[in-house]
Image: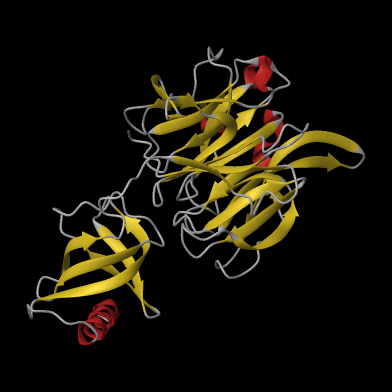
Amino acid sequence: MHRILTMTCFIMTLFMATNSTNAEVVSIEATVKSVDAQNNKITVERKGKITELDVSKNTDISNLKAGQKITLSYHLDLETVLKIETPQDGSSSSPKIIALDELNIASPNFAPWISKDGLSIFWTRNDSIWEAQRKNVDEPFQKQSRLFEGFMPSVSEDGLYMVLCRQLEIGNKEMGRKLFFSVRDNIESDFSPPREIRELRDMGILMTPCISPDGLSLYLSCYGPADDQKGHWAVTRETRSSKWDIAKIHRILPHPNPIPATTPFVTDDGLSLLLTKRTNAAHGAFGEFIVLTRDSVKDDVFSKYEKQIEVDGELIIGRFPRYCPATHELFFSAPVSDGKGSEGIWCIRNFDLSK
């Protein structure tokens, strides 16, 4: 009931501020906050008011981006968006590669992780994890803040649970890199000091975590020392308060792996795996981006080779590819100069992973 009243007030406010020749359909100018293409819903903002709207199944919302300005045709009786127009309609939407210079102010910067709406970014600068925000896709990231020591952050869809990599020391003994976690009560509060994911300690050297949107599946890379530990793995748990079920951990690529690949990223639907393919020694820590797929999340292994990622016929060379479907952007890290150790955050705008 509260949601219905809130939506009614929101729409009536827009209606009184909008002229329309049809009493049943009003024209609304708003800003996209988030897109739920699976359920045909969008969340929009106008004059400080935010609400979720149902969209007609005949209206394609797959190309909408968070922060985008749109004009809606909203049917008052049906309580449904019938049509969406954008200022970009008819304009070029070719992929474009840009360096996020606002983040690359001190090198190295690497391992980006983007929020579901594309408006917050987490990444590694030197030996610490940083966070920044932007108002929309056309604005630079601002309000940069250092969170704590660590590497390679990965954050759940609600922004409340983070997995990261850290060096572990027990007494005077160096245990190598392990996985830690940090939580917060809401997106306005600070993350807690990281704590080790103890049940994964005995796996070996762990890096490049990728948490699922719901926080119940974790993809990770192990670099030994034992041969049977090496590779890319997936582990699950029942709830966020449960321990990770190490007894059911499984590989997501065949072993031994025929593809020398690192920095795995699994898309929100769980069906595509992005990897950095390192086959050219001249690229050093970087490589080509490849996409593997599986038919169902019930399949343990991503067994189908899909494609390599390129723009204008040129293969992209970097590492840590991370895709944001809400904004159609592919974030990654790559050299920003010819200097040794130079690495920064890059982005491919207008990128559709499904094509």
Instruction: Depth check: give the residue in front, 50 or 93.
Output: 93
Measured as percent of width and height from the top left, residue 174 is found at 86, 35
Q: Is residue 256 left or right of residue 336?
A: left
- The quadrant holding residue 4 is bottom left
The quadrant the C terminus occupies is: top left
Q: Is residue 124 above or below residue 176?
A: below
Decide if residue 101 is in sight here: yes
Is 146 placed above or below 214 here? below
In the rendered image, residue 329, in percent from the top left (x then y), is placed at 45, 45
184 relative to 63 in the view: left or right: right
In this view, the residue in front, 215 or 354, is: 354
- In the displayed structure image, the side of residue 146 where residue 14 appears, left or right: left
**Residue most extreme to the front:** 91
Residue at 55% x, 68% y: name it: 186
Q: Residue at x 64, y 48 (%)?
A: 123
Colour convention of the picture: secondary structure
Q: Position of residue 200 (x, y in %)?
A: 65, 37
Observer able to see residue 192: no
Looking at the image, the residue that sits furthest to the right is 172
Residue sitting at x 32%, y 54%: 64
Counting from the top left corner in percent of width and height, residue 152 is at 65, 42
State the quadrant of the N terminus. bottom left
> On screen, 41 above or below 344?
below
